[in-house]
Amino acid sequence: MRSPSVPSRAAATYDVRRHNVAALLRALLEEGPAPRVDLAERLSMSSGTTTRITAELTRAGLLQELPALTSGDAGRPRVPLDLASARFHAVGIHVGLRRTTVGLVDLRGRPVGDKIRIPHGGELDPATVVGEAAERVAGLIPTTSAQIIGTGFTTVGRVDAASGRIRDHDMLGWTDVDIPALAAGRFPGLLVVDATQRALCRAEMWFGVDPGVRDFVHLYIGNVVGAGIVIDRELHHGQNEGAGHVAHLPLSRPAQLPCECGRGGCLMSVAGDRAVVSRALREGVLTEERSVHDLTERARRGDSLADYLLRDRARAIGEAVATVHDLLAPDQIIVFGTPLLVPDHITEIRREARRWMRRDFDADQLIKPSALDDDAPVVAAATCVLERFYADPFALIS
């Protein structure tokens, strides 16, 4: 009978080293610059281990020393270390319904330079979309002296993250699209493909939500509707990558436009961007096919009917939030997307959720607007790479 395999001493040593490196980088990311002695104490590492790791990371260009802290003590100066976030960038690519957006993001999840928007103009062929994105990324590379560690590629739909295949995307009409094959080495560094919903969850975990929040749902409302689910700080994928598909969650309200699911009154057909614009056209608030941004602008200028339509949409989202909470009972439900164009509408979502929920809760603490801004789709795509970087940086920069 064959005995179980035992990891070699070298492999075990590498795993410990990788764990320590990841812990130190995460500490600097979350808590900011710190001297070596503070890092050792915070991470319960020996001073020798901390010195070796920081020296290795500094030689690799991943850390930089800041000016010494002033102190009345007579000992060695306390020199803070910080992430050299400007030396390494990740590319973020988000494919939406109307456009593809491309940009660079640094190690702290901050956009670098301007985003590039590529209108689809009705052209949704996957090879064309990927090819145009590759051309724009190639044009971005000369604009930075930073090393590009990888490319994150996201879209809303059912995505097999392991293979990089878009299994299906109803809005784009994509089925079983092999993104790595279409890219064929045209994107720099490691290519990571994932669903927008999960990528936004990653971005919230790394750069948004408080580290003390262990379980949360990230609800995305736009031209498409979806959710990402985080349980104990781990993304929940579900069977066949199916977790978080809340677009067809049934509501008590009438549909505002036909839905491909064949039912009326589901979340996307009531609260999606196209649904609220369709209703605004029928109500005469908009006189031609425009975007939800145009409707929002009318509400800001004092159009009471436009404001009512957007608030009614927020109430529909509140009903959906109540259902999600009753099902999963997360620490927080984070709302992201066009409903936040009018910040006050988060209050409408909370008020309606209270009406539907069957248990007491603090709506202000449970239902939060996303900490991410308009750059979120690009930052989220890049975070798919940054997460790999923080787990094992030397695997990406070597």
Image (tube, grey):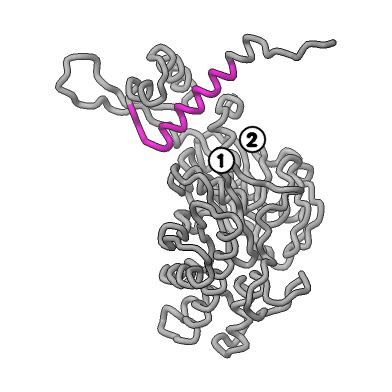
Q: State whether residue 381 is above or below residue 306.
A: above
Q: Residue 137: where, in percent of width, then height?
A: 62, 46
Q: Quadrant of the C terminus?
A: top right
Q: Quadrant of the N terminus?
A: top right
Predominant SS of the magenta segment: helix
Verify CB contact (< 8 Å) between mark 2 and mark 1: yes
Residue at position x 67%, y 70% in the image: 250
Query: Crowding near pointer 2: few (<14 within 10 Å), some, many (20+)?
Result: some
Q: Disc 2 marks which amino acid? A: Gly
Element at label 1:
strand
The residue that disc 2 covers is: 189
Residue at position x 42%, y 78% in the image: 300
Residue at position x 76%, y 71% in the image: 260
Check residue 24 for magenta coloring: yes
The residue that disc 1 covers is: 90
Q: State whether residue 151 is above or below residue 336.
A: above
Q: Disc 1 marks which amino acid? A: Ala
Residue stretch in magenta: 14-34
Q: Residue 204: where, in percent of width, then height?
A: 51, 49
Residue at position x 63%, y 9% in the image: 9
Element at label 2:
loop
Q: Residue 124: where, in percent of width, then height?
A: 75, 61
Is residue 295 visible in this depiction of the protein?
Answer: no
